[in-house]
Each structure stands twice: as structure tokens, then as C-alpha cells.
Amino acid sequence: MKYPDDEEMKYPNDEKREIENIELDQNKPWNEANKTAHTIVEQMVKKKQKGIVVVSTNLDQLARPNGRWFFQNIPFTMMINSDKYMKEKKVIPPYVVYSFHSKNITFDNVTIDGCVYVIDCVINGSGHFHITQHLIHTSQSVIRYNFQRHVFTVSLPIDSNKLMKSGIDLYEISNFDEAIALIRFALCFRLQSQSSSDIDVAHSFYWLGKAYNEKGEFDKSIEYHKKALTIRLDKLEPDHIDIGESYNMLGIAHDNKREYDKALEFYQKTLVIWSKKLDSSHSDVADSYNNLGRVYYMKAEYDKAYEYHKKALDIYSQKSDENQIKVAICYCHLGNVHYRKGEYPESIECHEKHLKISLEQLGEDHTDVAASFINLGKSYFETGEYEISIAYHEQALQKFDEAHAFVAISLNELGLVWIKGKMQINKAKEYVDKALEILIDDKSNDFDLELAKSYDVLGLILEKDGKYEEAIQSFEKSLEIRFKNLNDNDPYIAWSFHYLASVFKNKNDLDKSIEYGEKALKLRLNKLDWDHPHVGESYILLGDIYLARGTKTKAKKCYEDALKIFDKRFSEQHQKTVHVRLILEKINEQQAYIIVDETKELIKLKGLVYEELIQQIYSCLNLQSFKKMQQENLTFDLVDMRDNIIDSDEAVQQSFMVEKPSFKIRWRPIISGKCKIIKNALVVMIAISEYTDKKKYGDLSNVKDEDVNNFKQLFEQELNYTFVVNESPQMTKKEVRSFLTKFIAKYKLHANTRKYDGLIMIICGHGEKGNMLVTSDGKSLSIDEIRELFDLPKIFIIDVCRGETSPTAHSTTSTRGKIQKKETVQSLGHSGDGFLTIWSTISGYQ
């Protein structure tokens, strides 16, 4: 095509032109008409004829009578229906194909509703001239008109492969509208010049489907991919790699439409073909695993999601240098799966790996870095580490423009931390108000689920403020959005049920509260593991509801189920575990009165067992009572107010048939014939007060500052016994054993040549289940093992925790040296093994 000088027509800037994506590829008459036009153009070129070929619907309406002489310039409207110029006319309803022969054609104030082919002639225009579709020209043609609106222009001969490449290049730079225009034109040309089942046509359908998917027009994407698949199945082998591509893109489109079962079907077909045709370590196979993992994740089938994402990671990791970004994405996916499974430490580990790679490969300003911050913030919130969670979300906020929809994600999470974790209404409202402002203005519908979370946070704030009706409205909005965007059994819907149950409980509408609480629990148990922390949250809420209703037995069962979960998923010291345990202790707590020498005290029991009742009685005895027992050689019987002796669990339980029963102690003398006076005793004390792991085992300052001095004063100064104690407040397991070995050797205990008539051993420090002493290095040493070292008559005073294991002995009396404050003392007497063991705790209490 020859171009005029500067004053003549120039092509418009590609970046400014408007594209009208009229779907002509689906218009069979249009393609048939243009196929006819191509034949006419080829004949004119072959015969070296000059002129135009027009495909239009409205040309006859534009015709005007020719009133000019032959030597005058004739405008186009006068050429219509003129035998001198119009040489051919073929009707293909609703279109007509015309051919006009002339070296010069002037379009006078007309709009051609169709397309114009220009063959080696000059085109002029006067007034307003427009072509609604295409202007196709030979290289020798000259266009001397500057179109006011964009007209899609292409030169002859048409190279559809080149057009496809240009369209794909535009797709790759996310210019999807122009990509669609070029690809559709190439598709139309292929439909007009070849068989409609040609494999190249399938290629055009495929790329149109990809472009529409990126535009978010998923129905159109599916339509074009199905057309491509139909042709490929007809023309190619059933396991051809291109058929796998079509299956994959159909899976992606259905995935984006949240039609997960259909997506799963196509992804699985893709994997079958790619696994067969490609190497097992090929990145496309890994991509297929990732796609399957994503669908299973969205279907809340988290074990399968983990399996496929892990397979993808294993493949990418084989060539990690080439696939660093994909490795990072896999860690992100795996972190999300762990998060949904309630495995928060594992989630944190994966997201930290994602963050590290993203920072190295993409830089600190990339959105993937912000995504890592958000995910880490969410995981730390679930572990109860609120300050760390806040810090990560605040870092994420710095990565986006203030009005960006992604900002709302962190704003929501910050609101959640402040209202559920920190219990601060004002801070939470500050964040959620900003999130709502952004999300309500967002028209993309991509963040609807974040809008639901905003309504959750707002509802929690209103509930905390006592505005229950408004809170209910907010939670119902959240529920409506989730039902619209998620499958009915998605566990995230359970949060809406959970929050509604809570607010109805606070509103004292307990029937509705139970209804929603049980819905939340049922949904969670259906999709999550039985020990998921969110299942535990449901049990706690239902426990609260049943407790408010006065159904104590059901409440207790719910709390016990929650405690099992939190004990397994969190540590015993975790705030959630401690919270539930305290609730259960309060539920199990029984009250009674103890009368000692006319003094009446209220006691609380955690279990209706004789052992604990005796324990509580000793806590009520003061120093005068112990002196009285020593000086007057007294012991006591425990009796009820009718003087019935209480000496068994059954007797205790019978007494508690009435609320807050009363007990009294009845003094009686100890028969002297059964007493043994110890004059020459050896006392050894193991006192451990400092620990290496201070988070798990806090230092015991009282052991070092008070207990050692008290026992030393009692046994060494008052009773004149030999007293031995370790010098250092720290003792490892190895050092304890060494200390005991040297002690036995120094005092010649194997032969007892010094004639000690008793050995008193005192053990102070942290303990664990199974009668274990915890040494300073965190290791455990069996107290029973220590007992086996000695053959003398002996007394053990043990001030350590011992879990749920009790030594074999029967309850009797005891003291704990010089008492400076009320202590929890438990005494266990001889059981035939020569031991008197005095414990400071009862079994089952730490």
C-alpha cells in the first residue's frame, strides 16, 4: 500500500484505538460472504483489475442516481447499481458481496456496514466516511482519508499465522482486547479460506479461550475451548499433547467459575495425557499437580490438596534453579493447606520459605511478599501470638496503595486480631471501617469473601458493644455472601454459623444459639479433622451455651472434647488449653465446710475422692494444730456432722448428696506401742531451683531461698540430724546421679557402719507424670529409681509435680517440716516396702 504525504491519512496510534470485539467468527453468513469476496479479490488481482470489493448489508440503501458526465469524478454512492462501475453482485443473506472497478473511488459521507477490500486503487473520502468492520488492501493501494473512528486495517495477502503471532504477543503483555481482535480476525480468515475443522482453526479457538479467561469472561472461554477440543479430538490422536492443553484450559475456566467438580474432571484428564507424553519431572506435569491441589483445596479436601501440591513441589525442586518462583508458590499452597488443616506451626514454616524465596527472586515490593506477610499474620493469630500477627499485617499494608483491594485483607485481619485477640473495640473498628470502605467500592467481585469477613469483624464489634440485633444483621450479611460464593459444605461458612450462635447466646435466645452452634460443629466435623482447633472452638461455644441453659453434663462433655483437641494441637500452657481447663475445674469444683477446733473454713474439691478431701483438711490445719499433734501425740478421724467416720471415696460421695456438706476432725491419741523414735537420722536434700529452658520450666526461687533453710533449721538445728544438700541450684541428670553416688560412698550407707536408724530424703523441683523429677537440663529422673538406691528405714519428702501416677500406698498423716504458709500436703504411708512417702501434690494435679 502506498501512503500519501503528511497531509494525507495516517494510521491511528494502536494504543489509543478502540476495539469492537464483534464475534463474527460465529456468524456463518458473514464468513460465507467473505469467502466469496476473497475469491473475487483473487480474480481481480490475477487480471490486474483495480477497484474494491464490499461485503455489506446496507449498500443498496446508499445508492444515488448518476447525474454527472463520464469525465467528472463520480462519488461512490453514484457507482452503486451503475453497470459502468459495479461489475458483480452476489447475495448471501443478510449480506451482499459487490465488486466495483475503478482506479479512484471517493466515499461520500457514507457508512459501510461491513468490510471493504481495496485492490490497487486510490481511496478518497468526503464528509463522514466509516467502515464498521475491516479495511483490507493490497500493497499498491493508496488510502487518502483519515478515519475519525478506528477501522481495523490489514494488508493483502493475509498471513493468518503472522496475525496469530501478533495476537499472542498482545496476550502475553496482558493487552487482551486487542489480542482478541487480531486472533478473531485470523480465525475468521481461516474459516473463510479453509475447512472449519482445520487444526489451525482449533488453534485460534484455543487462544481466544485463553484471552477470554484472562478477561474473566469464563463462559466465553469455555465455549471457545470446547470448540478447539472438538476439532482436536477429531483431527489428533486422543492422547495428543494439544488435547491435554485443551483439557487443562477447560479445567482452569471451570475452576475460575468455582465449578470444582468439572474442573477436577478436566484436570485429571490433563494429568493422564501429560504423564504419558511428558517426562515425569516435566514442569507441565507439576503444573497439573498444582491445579489438582488447588481444586481439592477449594473443595476442602485438604489431605488430597496436600498430596498434589507436595508432588508438584518435588518436581519443581529437582530443577530448583529454573523453578524458584514455582517452588515458592508451592510452599505458599502447602502453607495454606496446613493453615486450613489447623496445623499452624507447619503453615508458618512453609510461608516463611515462600517469603524467603520471594524476597530473593522478586524483591521486597512484590505482591507475593505482601501475600507472605498476610499468610504469616493469619497463622500467628491462630497460635495466639497476636503481636507477631499484627506486625506482619502492618508490613503487608505498606506494600499496596491505600485504596487497593488487597489492603482490605490485612485491614480485616488486623480488625480480627484486635477484637478477638486483644479485645479492643476501637482499634478493631478503625481497621474494619477502612476495609469496608475499600471493598464496598470494589466492583470486581473478586473480593466478596473478604467483604464477608469485614461483616464478621463488624458483627463481633457490635456484639462486644451489646448491640445484638445489629450484630445479627452483620453476621447474616456475611452468611449470605458465603453461601453465594462457596460450596454449601465449605468450612468457612461455619464461621457465620458460629458467630450467629454466639450472639444469640448473649441475647439469651438459647434455642437459636444451639441451632447455629450445632450447624457450625456439624459442618466442621464433615470437612475438617476431628482434632482441628476450629472444631475445638465449636465445642467451647456449645459448652458455653449448654452451661447458660443449665445443662451442666452436656456442657462438661463439650469442654472435655475441646480440651482433648487443644491438648493435642497446642501445649498444655497454651492460653486456649488453660482457658478450657479452668472452665472444667470450675464446673467440677465441689464446696464443703471443714470444722477444726470450732474454726469453720470453706474448701473446694476438684473431685469427690477421699484422698483430695484429706489433702484439703491438712491445708486447713494451722501451726498450733501441728504442734498440738506433736506435743500430745495426736492424730484425727474425719467425721461428718453425725459423727460418721469418713474413710473412703464412697463415704465422701455419699456426704456430697447434700450441697456444701460439713465435716469436722475428731482428735484421738496415737497408740504409743506403734511409734518409732528416730534419733540418729541422715537427711539428704536434692534442691533444684534453676532450669535451662525457662520458657518450659520456670525457676523456683522458693526452693533456694526458703525450702532449703526451713528444712535445714528443722532437721539440723532442732532435731540434730546430719543434713546434706547440693550446693548449686542447678543440677543436671548426670550431676544428680553423681551426687547420690558420692553421698552413699561418703556416708558408707551400703554397710551402714555409722548406724543411722533412718534416712530422710527431700526432693524439691519440677516434676512430670510417672513420679519423675525434672533436672536443670530438662531431662527426667525416676524418683522410684532413687528409692531403690537405699536399704535403710526411710522417709521421702517429695515436692514435685507427678501427673496422674500415684505410688502404691495408703493415706495417712504427714507434715512438711517447718510450715510458714498453708501448703498442699499429701501423705502416703507404708505399703510393705519400708517407705513413708510425703507428697506436696495429689495425683492428677500439676
Image (spheres, grey):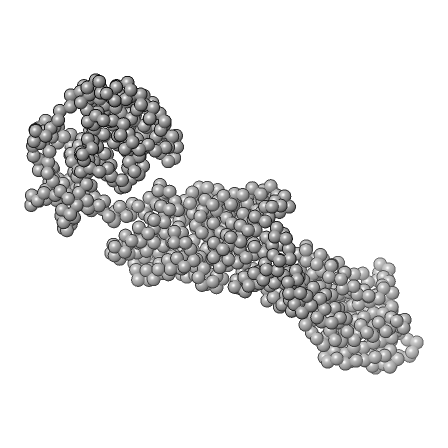
Residue 283 can be seen in this image: no
In-front residue for pair 163/126: 163
* Residue farthest along the front direction in this orientation: 751
Question: As displayed, is residue 237 above or below residue 366?
Answer: below
Q: Quadrant of residue 738?
A: top left
Percent across and percent down for residue 283 are 62, 52
Q: Is residue 195 left or right of residue 536?
A: right
* Residue farthest along the right direction in this orientation: 71
Question: As displayed, is residue 837 above or below residue 167?
Answer: above
Give the residue at x 66% y 62%. Answer: 240
Give the residue at x 23% y 44%. Answer: 606
Question: As displayed, is residue 11 above or below residue 72?
Answer: above
Percent across and percent down for residue 354 are 55, 45
Number of labelled discs? Answer: 0
Question: As displayed, is residue 479 above or below residue 125?
Answer: above
Where is the C terminus found, in terms of image quarters?
top left
In-front residue for pair 504/284: 284
Q: Is residue 406 left or right of residue 819?
A: right
Percent across and percent down for residue 116 are 79, 71
Give the residue at x 10% y 30%. Answer: 674
Give the residue at x 66% y 60%. Answer: 241
Q: Is residue 754 left or right of residue 96?
A: left
Residue 315 can be seen in this image: yes
Percent across and percent down for residue 121 are 87, 69
Where is the N terminus found, in terms of image quarters?
bottom right
